[in-house]
Image (cartoon, grey):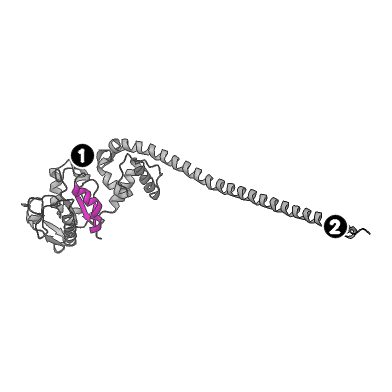
Amino acid sequence: MLPFAHLTTSTTRYRPRVAGFKTMKNIKAHSIFVVAALAVALTVVSFASRISRGQAPNRKSESHTKDANLSFSEAASQNVSLKNDLSWTFGGKQQKGWYLYSLLIGKTVNTQKDASSNDFAGAIATWQKKSGLRASGVFDEESLMAMISQWQAKRLKDRSSAQPDQLVTVDSSEFYDPERLPELRSVERNTYQAYRRMLVAAIADPTLKLAHTKKGELVPAEKFFKIISAFRSREYQDKLRRESPNAGTAGLAVNSPHFTGKALDIYVGGDPVDTRDSNRAIQVNTPVYKWLVQHAERFGFRPYFYEPWHWEYVGP
């Protein structure tokens, strides 16, 4: 045997095991590569699927928002016209537009946006839906009448005449006309107390700039916020109606809340109790009227929408 015969034989026998090891190693490497590739592919597919699912609602939401904005834009355009030109009737008198009631409307639908805005139309639509109306965002005659009904429903229900022991006679300095007769300066007791609390709050508001004494009383020259009229007897109301035959039931009611002593006419500007549109347009733009719209309810007072000066105490 040659000296290296054993070594040669040994080497020859070992080679297959080396080749087999390399083959298995290659198979394992290939398998790992395939698994890794599949994992990457699955990750990409899953990510793409999530992205796809996430984008679809966004596109739908964006489309819905655009449709809503377009709808409210059209409603806003109509509201601009209706604000000044809508024809309707109240109290036996022909009315035009609802611009005189913009503040009350905004208060009711909880917005301070102008009627020309999409936001105003959106707020109207929300209120319409809650009120059982078609939520168009257009404040048309049907919506106006529905809102007026809501306002009127919050006014005094019982209009029985106040008894003498329910009334207090207020000092003439608290009236718009300091020469008003004592029998025309009566106010229901709880109403007067609520009015005084409201007056204190108004005087404390620097934006109103109400001239007052150190004791918190309006000075004689200050007319804003003073009482024009309160309790009226039925006889006195009939007298007013005879003197103003064209006032209609909107201005001088047959069954007036003034009979209760709980209705106050408060000076808010302009001609004190003139129902002409030109006069009311002045009144609804004064700081005092705007303040009352925002704050009177806190003190138990509700407005009579048609008369900016008229406020009724219904309790807290």
- Image quarter (top left, top right, bottom left or bottom right) of the N terminus: bottom right
C-alpha distance separating marks 2 and 1: 119 Å
Residue 21 visible here: yes
Mark 2 lies on a secondary structure that is helix
Lower sequence index among marks 2 and 1? 2
Q: Which residue is mark 2?
A: 11
Label 1 crowding class (10 Å Cα cut-off): few <14, some 14-19, many 20+? few
Residue 119 position in % (x across, y down): 35, 44
Q: Would you identify the image quadrant in which residue 83 lies?
A: top left
Marker count (numbered): 2
Q: Which residue is mark 1?
A: 277
Residue 207 position in % (x across, y down): 18, 51
Q: Would you say 155 lies left or right of 140 here?
A: left
- Residue sitting nearer the eye, 114 or 283: 114
- Residue sitting nearer the eye, 55 or 11: 11
| Residue 200 badge | none
> At 14% from the left edge and 58% from the top edge, which residue is drawn?
187
Q: Would you say 59 lies left or right of 213 here?
A: right
Residue 91 visible here: no
Task: Give, as a three-letter code, the residue at label 1.
Answer: Asp
Which segment is the magenta one?
287-316
- Residue sitting nearer the eye, 300 or 246: 300
> At 24% from the left edge and 54% from the top edge, which residue is drawn?
295
Verify whether residue 312 appears in magenta.
yes
Most distant residue in the left direction: 179
Q: Would you identify the image quadrant in which residue 166 lies?
A: bottom left
